[in-house]
């Protein structure tokens, strides 16, 4: 069976969040199950800079009313895990950012990702002959729309929703500019409150929809989490499932990770402390090493519960803890963290940037990881934390609910701390419960052991995708 993944980001080439992790790792595990998998992503400036070993494969031309666009197809000759193709068009992709610059989205994102999707579809049909094309989020939702509109071919499409909050909403003219028929602008197709919603189109035109955790697949059918698309999702519920994301256990592996200071596993878990010490040294921090380190590695957006953290911040700083945040996003919230950094320099450190290597060092050096998300389609950071022996503290929503269970000392099970209502004092209570655990070293070891030995690899979830693909092509 031949599967083509089409997406806007993938590790190790380019990543802004969990989407990149998933798209970069799942194909590897599908390949292990015997599938023939290829990946297509845009050739961004940041990928160009890597000077990869590339092979020219083909050129695709796309015309709309105004212009002719040329897209070169390049193949990464050094990726032996699976075939990776880049779509090159300097006008669209040789820019500083991926989706935006200085926090402002590129206004022609519908053309950038619309034509990228169409070029990927044309190339796939011509050169790859897939059974299934698997697209991800709004950026590639254009593909099932183009396919059903212009091609009468037996290729199935699967759309995975990694985050329903981002939908690709543009004005009405975008349909015409992309060369799509104007009758797509109707309530049962792409129209959305006077605009065009390309994710909505993807949900309607794809053969099957998945999302990244079982709980999120139910939540998005309700108003609270549906961002206006709950009706469409409900209509398609027979063709919608939630498959829990995994993480790449080869890449996120404390025993082999070459980005951390000292490798370790549960048998020498005390090396976590040495990692913490070296992290403080690297960052020039005068933190008390005996106090637990709590951390956040996150996009700084309201989705991630930043307001809860800010509301309890002063109270948090009264506790015997240290706190590090590594993240970027909303400028206003970033500035608040930088301000707090000045007030509490001996307990709190804000690193406002995206830094993969540093993220590994922080996962390793931390005792607890905070994820007080308002909503969370799946969440990878809590799984990465568990893998590194760092105990997650999460709000019970989406994939967090499917992966973290409150520690119960009576029955000795659970891998973290969980709170339910989106309320600051609930988060604060959970942190206080974790602090109690920290003071009981025997119980602490027990919870770390449960976490570090749990299995959130792709081994199980990739099989779920295989089952789905089989069902689809035999339909
Ligand atoms: P989301 O996809 O919503 O951002 P996930 O928890 O699914 O959240 O995935 C986030 C991924 O991005 C994780 O691999 C996390 O380590 C990484 N990440 C988030 N922010 C940063 C940052 N500032 N620097 C490095 N890695 C980050």
Image (cartoon, rainbow, N blue to C red):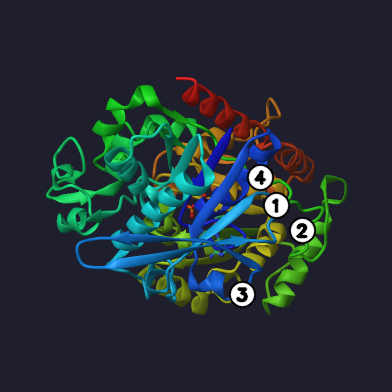
Disc 1 from disc 3: Cα separation: 30 Å
Disc 4 from disc 1: Cα separation: 14 Å
Q: Are marks 2 and 1 in contact (CB under 8 Å)?
A: yes
Q: Nearer the viewer, mark 4 or mark 1?
A: 4
Q: Is residue 139 above or below residue 446?
A: below
Q: Give 430 or 14, whichever is nearer the viewer.
A: 14
Disc 4 from disc 2: Cα separation: 18 Å
Q: Which residue is mark 3?
A: 346
Q: Where residue 81 sits: x, y (%)? A: 69, 50
Could you tell which of marks 4 and 3 lies nearer the N-terminus?
4
Q: Give 392 or 33, whichever is nearer the viewer.
A: 33
Crowding around mark 2 (Cα neighbors within 10 Å: few <14, some 14 to 19, many 20+) is some
Could you tell which of marks 2 and 1 lies nearer the N-terminus?
1
Q: Secondary structure at mark 2?
A: loop
Crowding around mark 3 (Cα neighbors within 10 Å: few <14, some 14 to 19, many 20+) is some
Q: Which residue is mark 2?
A: 257
């Amino acid at each position: 069976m031949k599967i083509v993944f089409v997406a806007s980001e993938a590790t190790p080439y380019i990543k802004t969040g969990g989407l990149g992790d998933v798209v970069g790792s799942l194909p590897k595990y599908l390949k292990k199950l015997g599938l023939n998998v290829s990946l297509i992503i845009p050739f961004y400036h940041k990928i160009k800079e890597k000077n990869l070993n590339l092979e020219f494969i083909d050129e695709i031309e796309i015309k709309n009313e105004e212009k002719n666009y040329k897209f070169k197809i390049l193949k990464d000759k050094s990726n032996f895990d699976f075939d990776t193709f880049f779509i090159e068009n300097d006008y669209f992709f040789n820019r500083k950012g991926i989706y935006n610059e200085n926090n402002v989205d590129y206004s022609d994102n519908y053309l950038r990702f619309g034509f990228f999707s169409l070029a990927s579809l044309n190339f796939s049909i011509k050169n790859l002959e897939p059974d299934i094309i698997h697209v991800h989020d709004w950026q590639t939702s254009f593909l099932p729309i183009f396919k059903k509109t212009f091609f009468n071919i037996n290729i199935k499409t699967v759309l995975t929703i990694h985050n329903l909050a981002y939908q690709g909403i543009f004005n009405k003219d975008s349909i015409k500019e992309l060369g799509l028929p104007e009758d797509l602008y109707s309530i049962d197709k792409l129209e959305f409150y006077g605009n065009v919603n390309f994710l909505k189109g993807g949900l309607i035109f794809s053969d099957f929809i998945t999302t990244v955790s079982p709980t999120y697949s139910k939540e998005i059918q309700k108003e609270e989490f549906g961002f206006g698309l709950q009706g469409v999702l409900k209509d398609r519920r027979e063709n919608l499932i939630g498959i829990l994301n995994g993480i790449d256990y080869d890449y996120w592996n404390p025993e082999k990770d070459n980005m951390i200071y000292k490798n370790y596993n549960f048998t020498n878990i005390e090396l976590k402390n040495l990692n913490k010490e070296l992290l403080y040294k690297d960052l020039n921090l005068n933190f008390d090493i005996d106090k637990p380190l709590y951390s956040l590695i996150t996009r700084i957006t309201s989705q991630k519960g930043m307001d809860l953290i800010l509301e309890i911040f002063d109270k948090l700083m009264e506790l015997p803890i240290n706190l590090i945040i590594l993240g970027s996003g909303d400028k206003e919230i970033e500035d608040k963290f930088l301000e707090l950094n000045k007030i509490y320099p001996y307990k709190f450190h804000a690193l406002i940037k995206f830094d993969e290597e540093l993220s590994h060092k922080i996962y390793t050096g931390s005792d607890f990881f905070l994820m007080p998300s308002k909503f969370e389609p799946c969440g990878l950071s809590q799984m990465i934390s568990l893998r590194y022996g760092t105990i997650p503290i999460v709000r019970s929503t989406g994939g967090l609910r499917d992966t973290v269970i409150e520690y119960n000392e009576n029955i000795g099970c659970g891998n973290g701390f969980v709170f339910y209502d989106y309320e600051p004092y609930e988060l604060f209570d959970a942190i206080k419960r974790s602090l109690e655990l920290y003071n009981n070293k025997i119980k602490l070891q027990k919870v770390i052991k449960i976490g570090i030995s749990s299995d959130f690899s792709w081994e199980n979830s990739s099989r779920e995708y295989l089952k789905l693909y089989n069902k689809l092509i035999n339909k």
